Amino acid sequence: MKIADRARPAPRALPDGISPDEVTRATNRLVAYVSGRTDGDGAIREQCESRVLESALALALMTRTGDVSPARDRLLAYLRGHQESPDTLDRVLASLAVGGAVGRVPDNDSTLVGTLAQGVLGAAPGFISDRRRLMVYAVLTVLGCPLPADAELPGGGAVPTDPLHSWAAVQQASITLILAASLGVRNRATDTALETLLATDPGATVWEGYALMHLLVLHALAGTPGQETTVRRGLATLLRHQRTDGGFPFVLEMHNWCTSTGGLALHAAGADPVLLRRMAATLAAQRGGAHLRSLSRGAALTGGWSMSPIVAQNDVDDTSCALEFLQVVDPVAHAATVRDGTAALLAVQGADGGFPTYVRDASSEPCMTAAAVCALGPHPETEPQRAKALAFLADHQLADGGFEPGWSRSRLHSLFRVRLAACTAGPDDARTADMAARIERTVRETQNPDGGWGMQPGDPSDDVSTAYGLITLCHADAPGPVGAALTWLLGRQQADGGYGGPPDMVGPRPFAYHFPLLTDIPVLLAFGHVRARLLNRPGALQEAR
């Protein structure tokens, strides 16, 4: 995500009509805004906002267990406020949960379940389609909808053995028990699923800070005889994390992700080196993640970074961004940490050259592969592995120049990260150069008339997607699209220096969640790329303070 070391020489001037001082002032204001969100140790501890999916499941659980409390009243009010949401899935989930809470029986409409499932699958990578379809069935089932005719247990009802990371394994186990209760099935697979769920200790903790998974576990256990006490204790544990608006979040925290990506953006924009070193030291201390039992099947990434200190599940994205940040801030001080983290990253590279998100031998993903390439770029000894990874990216570029959905609703997210990965290629790598040119072409061709980009071609421009598009075109030659995008972003800055707009990050895919600062950070990174590639004036930030 940083400015690649081997980028082509920067143009010497901004596009016509763009004032360097205006760009610098906007950058400084955003630097101050993001810097102000760091704690004394340099960590960014942003809070995840409420989401309808978790909130609907929480209200259904409270209804199921007969909970009557002020917390339930606040939650009911939150969901009633989303019954007219423009988002179809949110609207249906809120209406079903509220209806169940007030005793209204939902329509016996299996077509609705199938329609929603197809909508979800259309926005998710193909390799998780069966898992996501069954998750939608399970969620709508606990909200009172009928099971579609094609409902079945994951894996056809067999005990699963495929390589799967901890979160997916717990999700799969929860879905197994929820669907098994509706189908009237009890077998070795359901017994194994129960063992997996109890291993998360749901009565005492929100496992790995994953509120959605905690709720799915409790719903699965609520349909299992003998688990009533665990469910009641688990609900009480969840209620400690109810947000002020009455709803519940996707996850409790993502401190490492916010700190590493925020740090990369601050570094690119020329922020205070003392702050950056403090952030890096705190991040370095979090390598390895929480010391919790792994429930992964297969060789999980270990020795890297998880999304937060309370999370054990290491992943390629967090590891890659943490490595990038430590390397640009102080590669000498963090040499041992970087060396060990790099080895952990390389250990999960697939035979196809790509990288998965979590577990070796799982499906490789373009966005994760691009993240790993950028992290490995400063290490000449990794050139063979990077060459294989870049070849994987070229192999998986779609006909329109894009890539399959990653961990963002925005098509531009994978495009900008692959474009930065391409900057690490050697000058004789013609295939990577062609891939980069196709990325630049599709980004130019999908730019909106107002200068910005939307999540998908034709969508209204939003701050995050426009930041991704601007970063991509900072590495191209045409100044006009860059000027239009920069003008659009400059006009969107808020009075406090920050930015807004719809969330783009998704989890589990394709459900969007929102940490507000994860909108500001990509915009700041985009300003950092403008600073490096276009301003081309040492000390420009200081001149306009």
Image (tube, helix red, strand yellow):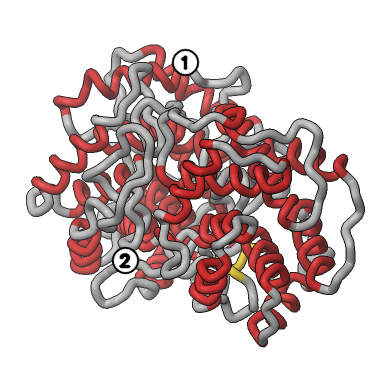
Q: What kind of residue is marked 1?
A: Asp
Q: Earlier in the sequence, mark 1 or mark 2?
A: 1
**Residue 305 pos. (x, y %):** 29, 50
Identity of the residue drawn at 87% across and 40% down: 111
Read off the residue under disc 1: 395
Query: Alpha carbon of mark 1 to alpha carbon of mark 2: how far?
Result: 45 Å
Task: Assign a secondary structure to mark 1.
Answer: helix
506 relative to 157, above or below: below
Q: Seen from this angle, which residue lies furthest bottom?
A: 70
Q: Please say if 162 is above or below 494.
A: above
- Residue 24 in view here: no
Foreground of the two, 291 or 478? 291
| Residue 449 image offset from top left, x and y in percent | 71, 43
Horizontal side of residue 428 vs 118, given as left or right: left
Q: Residue at x 72, y 49 (%)?
A: 460
Could you classify mark 2 by the number of other residues whose Cα lies within 10 Å: few (under 14), some (14-19), or many (20 or more)? few
Q: Position of residue 426 (x, y in %)?
A: 27, 20
Q: Position of residue 57 (x, y in %)?
A: 66, 62
- Nearest the viewer among 65 and 426 is 65
Secondary element at image label 2: helix
Q: Residues within 10 Å of mark 1 (few under 14, many from 20)?
A: few
Q: How many numbered circles are shown?
A: 2
Specify the label residue 273 is tagged with: none
Q: Quadrant of the N terminus?
A: top left
Residue bearing the label numbered 2? 543
Q: Residue at x 59, y 64 (%)?
A: 500
Q: Are marks 1 and 2 in contact (CB under 8 Å)?
A: no
Where is the C terminus found, in terms of image quarters?
Answer: bottom left
Q: Amino acid at mark 2?
A: Glu
> In the rendered view, does 24 fall on the left or right side of 130?
left
